[in-house]
Amino acid sequence: MESRSPLSGDLIDSFPISSSADVHQTVDSARIAARWWADLDWRTRRSLLMGLKHHLARHGDELAHLVHAEMGKPVDDARLEIALTIEHVHWAANHAQQILQRRKVRSGLLTLNQSATLEYQPVGVVGVIGPWNYPVFTPMGSIVYALAAGNAVVFKPSEWTTATGKWLVDAINTAIPQQPVVTLICGGGEVGSSLCTSGVDVMSFTGSARTGRRVLEACAQTMTPVVLECGGKDAAIVDQGADIAAAADAITFGAFSNAGQTCVGVERVYAHHEIFEELVDALHERASALEVGTHGGASYGPMTLPGASSVVAHHISDAVSRGGQAVLGGVESIDERVVKPVILVDVPEEAKAVTDETFGPTIVVNPVRDLDDAVDRANASGYGLAASVFGRDPRRLHSAATRLRVGMVSINSWVMYAGVPELPWGGVGESGSGRIHGADGLRAFSRAKSVVDQRFALPISLTSFDRPPWAGKLIMTAIKLRHGGWRR
Ligand code: NAD
């Protein structure tokens, strides 16, 4: 299997495709590393993960150039992705013990003689399947949190970014040389499918909703728990009173950076009708100044996958045929893999450009009556990954954030939740289920273990055939006194 640069067509590296037997064998071997890793104390694991952090920070530039070459995003965008990843390594390593270690919890009225503890134990081996669009930040959101929770990982990067995946696995094995706590397997969908049925203890998948369904189906056979991080059709809402220049700046980057190939990229904009025209003008001005290409200073690069432009073309022509208007570019903006920015306005809500993930440098901007109308339209999607809201009145903005049916919201910015490691990452509906990042992300790769320890025997044992006949009534009286409320 060859990895070739979408910028030049040059061969980056080639890899053997893992057979189904290889995948099963790799998962079996990973169990040995998993046991060694899980048996280490928290402090040792933390210090080894800190070593990984140092390695990534020192060699981040080399990795950024590899990401640039392999999937085509500008080097600085790759640097940003790597910087965010390093922040997550730091947080996960430093917080795993506090969040997962055994702690006492209060016992109940009927269990006063018990001391109770809760701990989150490693699950064993976590399977991670990654996409190509953020080949560092995205899989590492699973890998690093799975490691910090005490697991080993078998990682299948996207077939389009295997060299980046290999670089990451080599980096981890350099920082943690004692045992291969992360192993690489290579290939496309069949290899991912083998991983789903290989006996991994949790499967963490990032990719399209279509593949997510297949992963869920395959994992159902072995009752393997699944974290699904799937696609999106994220909306940006611009309320009256918003700083239009700042909103346009954030939306332009959110929509067009990485050639629009971002799961949380802005694909729809709902603008209050009073500021609609001003916003469209500001977006037009910014987007038309972007430079697309393969050169160093480009704002964004070509589409990574050879066939991706045809989806973009279909969404544009469908929107226009339904009465939408292209105010910047159109199908003519597509030159094979290079797609210049396209802005569509007044597009009917049932058009593909509004309902389906385009994953290209296009946006739909539609006017709305008010903030409620904007929230309703944003929510009328099967997807529910993230959203952004721009405006002036914090009360209105937070109320919109609460009502948006998504996992993540940024107010007066785009994507900033990604840089707060404590915030869980994930979506609802077609965008997936389960969370990576933060405490939820550590627990996603753990099993809760509940233990009670009897400190002394009660005079009456409620769980004995020898309990007295009046014990049941006594329990109900006690429960009534505690939970029955004061009004009789
Ligand atoms: P994809 O679904 O085509 O592939 C994702 C991964 O799944 C690849 O590694 C692929 O080889 C593997 N795969 C394919 N068929 C499989 C099968 N039957 N069983 C198991 N694995 C299989 O997605 P993609 O094109 O690589 O990535 C783009 C998609 O990922 C977009 O929809 C994007 O929105 C989404 N994404 C989501 C997030 C998130 O955090 N929610 C992040 C990045 C990308």
Image: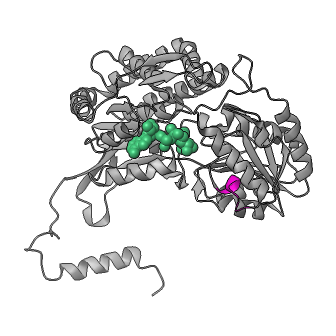
Q: Residue at 23% of width from left, 56% of height from top?
A: 114
Residue 379, image x and y in percent? 66, 60
Q: In this rendering, would 63 be left or right of 48?
A: right
Residue 354, image x and y in percent? 70, 55
Q: Residue at 70% of width from left, 40% of height from top?
A: 414
Q: Is residue 296 above or below residue 259?
A: above
Residue 425 seen in this snapshot = no
Q: For the magenta stretch, what is the residue range?
A: 349-355
Residue 488, image x and y in percent? 45, 88
Residue in the foreground of this view, choosing between 473 and 50: 50
Which image quarter holds the N terminus? top left
Q: Residue at 78% of width from left, 39% of height from top?
A: 332
Q: Is residue 454 above or below residue 156?
A: below
Residue 334, image x and y in percent? 73, 36
Residue in the foreground of this view, choosing between 258 and 98: 258
Residue in the foreground of this view, choosing between 48 and 323: 323
Residue in the foreground of this view, choosing between 435 and 255: 255
Inspect the magenta stretch and tell me whether residue 174 lies in it: no
Q: Residue at 58% of width from left, 59% of height from top?
A: 382
Inspect the magenta stretch and tell me whether residue 351 lies in it: yes
Q: In this rendering, would 271 be left or right of 411?
A: right
**Furthest residue in direction left, as rendered:** 466
Q: In this rendering, would 283 be left or right of 61?
A: right
